[in-house]
Image: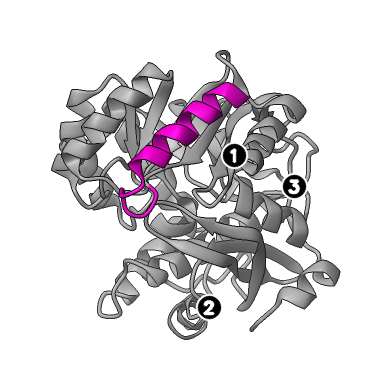
């Protein structure tokens, strides 16, 4: 980036790391966990601050402090795409995918939030709104849930919040729990009734032919969304499953670079592209991924971190929905003021007129969970 001589500049970038225990044992088809870590980036310009974050390893904060902050301090607070390019070039030898991409993402989101706050605009107004209402789907029916807890969670989304689309995890024990997967899908359909859209996420646990076999059962139970039926690294396998089933195949949450999304789309791997702004490079790259999908006539769905995605989701014409993920909703409601209400299955980013993405850190609540 070229230093500027006028206008607001980045005065400093700070980090904080918060680890929040889950409210019970959680697992999907390929991973189990008992806590979730949020890495926060705060970008300052004069008396104004912008917030961005990612979910990932605490070491992400070290990348922000050592690799990215020295690069950006003193440079324009207006030119976020230039900052994105500078960060991406600077980490060439460090390695961009993984936690480095998460670090870039958190800073990019904070820079966009800062810019909107400097202009005293909701972020969606800065970007330009395509819609006032952003659809969400309830997500987080973990494989560790018994029948009663799964039923309670699904009814909380549908009956209490009025969300008309929900998702559960399947692929238990790397695909070895197929019988229980089938049982849980049938139970889920019974819990939500026929009018609610039912989605499943295997987190890449199945083999190709296993995924095709399971898809027939899912179709019989009115499931319409099959997320990561096989590994998202297996693009030809995703395309094979997609061709063999009537369900929409979705993937992309582990896309750390724009070329990955390009390859996924070129392979015909998905019916709906997923992208996660906390992983792929922030708002800047997420919007580019949305444009790639639109060029191929496909929808984009925002993966997790719903309050990060809300404003950018409202700005793209080919959005399908935002994932209202249980863990991240808990954490964002705990740590921040300005969170949104999904009543009726939609959120309204910028509706209160607050500048930026509208989130402010609640230090009194966040403090006990800070680990760095």
Query: Looking at the picture, how far across and down is residue 23, in whole percent?
Result: 68, 59
Pointer 2 with pointer 3, Cβ within 8 A: no
Q: Looking at the rendering, in which quadrant would you find the N terminus?
A: bottom left
Disc 3, SS: loop
Pointer 2 with pointer 1, Cβ within 8 A: no
Disc 3 crowd rating (10 Å Cα; few below 14, some 14-19, many 20+) is some
Residue 239 to residue 67: above or below:
above
Query: Looking at the picture, how far across and down is residue 191, in whole percent?
Result: 61, 26
Residues shaded magenta = 172-191
Residue 289 to residue 128: above or below:
below
Asked if residue 2 lies in the magenta stretch, the reply is: no
Residue lying farthest to the top in this orientation: 195
User: Counting residues from the N terminus, which is met first, the one under dot 1 or under dot 3?
Assistant: 1
Main secondary structure of the magenta stretch: helix
Disc 1, SS: helix
Residue beneath disc 3: 339
- Front residue of 181 and 247: 181
Residue beneath disc 2: 58
Q: Is residue 118 left or right of residue 59?
A: right
Q: Give the CA separation, mark 2 to mark 1.
A: 34 Å
Q: In front: mark 1 or mark 3?
A: 1
**What residue is at 47 percent from the left and 62 percent from the top?**
32
- Front residue of 317 and 81: 317
Q: Give the CA separation, mark 1 to mark 3.
A: 30 Å
Residue beneath disc 1: 147
- Front residue of 372 and 36: 36
Q: Looking at the rendering, in which quadrant would you find the C terminus?
A: bottom right
Residue lying farthest to the right in this orientation: 364
Asked if residue 189 lies in the magenta stretch, the reply is: yes
Query: Looking at the picture, how far across and down is residue 16, in whole percent?
Result: 64, 77
Q: Is residue 44 at all visible to an observer of this figure?
A: yes
User: Counting residues from the N terminus, which is met first, the one under dot 2 or under dot 3?
Assistant: 2
């Amino acid at each position: 980036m070229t230093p500027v001589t006028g206008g607001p500049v980045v005065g400093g970038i700070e980090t904080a790391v918060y680890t929040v225990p889950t409210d019970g044992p959680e697992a999907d088809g390929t991973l189990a966990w008992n806590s979730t870590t949020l890495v926060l980036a705060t970008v300052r310009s004069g008396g104004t601050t912008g917030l961005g974050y990612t979910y990932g390893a605490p070491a992400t904060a070290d990348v922000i402090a050592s690799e990215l902050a020295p690069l950006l301090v003193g440079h324009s607070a207006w030119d976020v795409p230039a900052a994105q390019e500078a960060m991406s070039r600077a980490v060439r030898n460090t390695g961009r995918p993984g936690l480095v991409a998460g670090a870039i993402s958190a800073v990019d989101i904070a820079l966009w939030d800062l810019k909107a706050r400097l202009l005293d605009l909701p972020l969606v107004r800065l970007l330009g709104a395509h819609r006032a209402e952003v659809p969400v789907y309830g997500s987080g029916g973990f494989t560790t849930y018994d029948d009663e807890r799964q039923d309670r969670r699904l009814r909380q989304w549908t009956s209490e919040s009025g969300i008309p689309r929900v998702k559960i995890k399947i692929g238990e024990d790397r695909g070895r729990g197929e019988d229980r997967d089938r049982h849980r899908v049938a139970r889920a359909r019974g819990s939500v009734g026929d009018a609610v859209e039912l989605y499943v996420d295997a987190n890449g646990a199945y083999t190709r032919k296993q995924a095709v076999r399971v898809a027939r059962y899912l179709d019989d139970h009115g499931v319409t969304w099959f997320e990561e039926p096989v590994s998202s690294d297996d693009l030809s396998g995703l395309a094979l499953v997609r061709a063999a089933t009537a369900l929409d195949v979705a993937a992309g949450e582990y896309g750390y670079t724009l070329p990955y999304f390009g390859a996924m789309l070129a392979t015909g791997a998905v019916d709906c592209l997923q992208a996660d702004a906390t992983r792929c490079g922030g708002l800047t790259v997420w919007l580019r991924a949305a444009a790639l999908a639109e060029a191929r006539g496909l929808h984009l769905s925002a993966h997790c971190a719903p309050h990060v995605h809300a404003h950018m989701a409202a700005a793209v014409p080919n959005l399908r929905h935002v994932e209202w993920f249980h863990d991240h909703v808990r954490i964002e409601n705990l740590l921040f003021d300005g969170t949104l209400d999904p009543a009726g299955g939609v959120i309204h980013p910028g509706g209160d007129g607050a500048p930026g993405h509208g989130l402010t850190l609640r230090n009194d609540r966040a403090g006990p969970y800070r680990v760095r």
